[in-house]
Amino acid sequence: MVGRPDIKAFLSRVKASNISIAITNEILGPTRAAFCVPCTLSDGVRRIIEHVIIHYSNGMITRQVDVEAWD
């Protein structure tokens, strides 16, 4: 995704879906942040766990690294 329109469209699709999603274990620093995004899919059984590290400068995300595990 690049830019606000892409992010907005993605978040609209997530909101409309029947997925349980949260943000946990947040760590914030002056130039980086990290957090976990656990999700349970609509069947209530399958899960996705994503760990995210974002780098930012001047209030803008400059880099994002995601690692996902699907169950």
Image: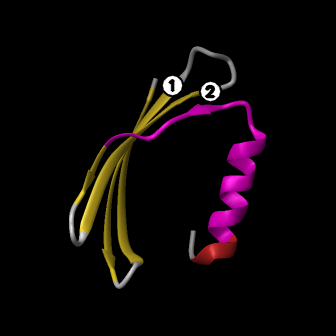
In the image, residue 13 above or below residue 40: below
**Which amino acid, mark 1?**
Arg
Residue tagged 2: 41
Label 2 sits on a secondary structure element that is loop
Residue tagged 1: 47
In the image, residue 32 above or below residue 46: below
Q: Residue at the right extreme?
A: 16
In the image, residue 29 above or below residue 4: above
Q: Which image quarter holds the N terminus?
A: bottom right
Q: Residue at the bottom extreme?
A: 58
- Count of numbered circles in the view: 2
* Residue interval drawn in magenta: 6-25
Residue 19, x across and y down, in percent: 65, 32
Q: Which comes before the other along the chain, label 1 or label 2?
A: 2
Q: Magenta segment: does it hold 22? A: yes
**Circles 1 and 2: CB atoms closer than 8 Å:** yes
